[in-house]
Image (spheres, helix red, strand yellow):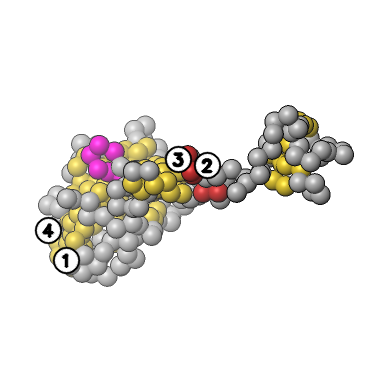
Amino acid sequence: MPTIIPASIASATFQSGAPNAPAVGGFWLDTDDGTLYFWNGSAWAEVAFDITASGGVPSSIGTTKGDVIAFSGAGVPVRVGVGVNGTVLQANSAVPAGVEFVSVGAVGDATGWVLIDQGVGPGGTGAFSFTGLDVYDEYRLIGRNLNGGSASSYDDVFIQFNGDTGTNYYNNNTASAVYIKIAQIPGYTLTVRGHMDVWISNDPSVGATVTSHHNNGKTPVLSGGGWITAEQVVSIDLTVANGFPSTCEFHIYGRNIA
């Protein structure tokens, strides 16, 4: 049974350093860190509080800066470890705590589209690539402020998947093609800039189908296109004969079909 110290003989000191010549039974609150100590006659002993007995949450549940306390059930607190920089807290009933830290790109909008990645044109004649894509049933590729390297004409934009440069594509009624044409964008000397909205449906058992929903009033995918191979899309390469200037913007989204 704990010893009860009469209030008449107990004293309390509030300061940043340990008091000198304390009386037995005296208390000291360290104003630097808020820790409470008790003088037991030979040393200052930290006073520990069992707040769980009164329904509180013990401070020891948090171990890292940014940790969050959630509940796995009624009255059952659990630690949710802080995510990496840039992540956000999102509800997920499939995890024990009911919430988890996820990357910003994993937070979907009302239509289910999730931003996976974005970037700008590489300049020169290089391709623009999205690699390491998360797995989704559908992808949506949006390009803005687009122009190619031609001086005065429109440049064709082609798409390939997973680094496949073989004849596994179906392009505008042409079988055994090496790419799918998805857009035509203005040359760099023209005053207009192009944009495109391309949808990609992926079935790992048969490949991918591609449709272009809008592209400056043109119809770059005349009868649709397809990538005929039993693979999951994990990377996308866009090429244009004369390259994408760094002013070009690309965004790729994904969503799953329930």
Does label 3 or label 4 sit earlier along the sequence? 3
Q: Residue at x 39, y 47 (%)?
A: 76
Q: The disc labelled 4 sits on which kind of residue?
A: Asn
Res 103 label: none
- Between disc 1 and disc 2, the foreground one is 2
Q: CA distance from mark 1 to mark 4?
A: 18 Å
Q: CA distance from mark 3 to mark 4?
A: 70 Å
Q: Which mark is residue 51?
A: 2
Q: Is residue 101 left or right of residue 213?
A: right
Q: Amino acid at mark 1?
A: Val
Q: Which residue is mark 1?
A: 206
Badge 4 is on which residue? 173
State if disc 3 and disc 1 touch (CB < 8 Å).
Answer: no
In this view of the protein, can residue 186 be seen by the observer?
no
Residue interval drawn in magenta: 109-114
Q: CA distance from mark 2 to mark 3?
A: 7 Å
Majority secondary structure of the magenta segment? loop
Q: Is residue 109 left or right of residue 14?
A: left
Inspect the image, locate mark 3, and give the three-letter code of the amino acid beneath it: Gly
Q: Secondary structure at mark 3?
A: loop
Q: Position of residue 246 (x, y in %)?
A: 46, 44
The quadrant holding residue 197 is: top left
Q: Residue at x 73, y 36 (%)?
A: 27
Q: Nearer the viewer, residue 17 or 165?
A: 17
The answer to whether residue 116 is above or below residue 214 is below
Check contact, mark 1 vs mark 4: CB within 8 A: no
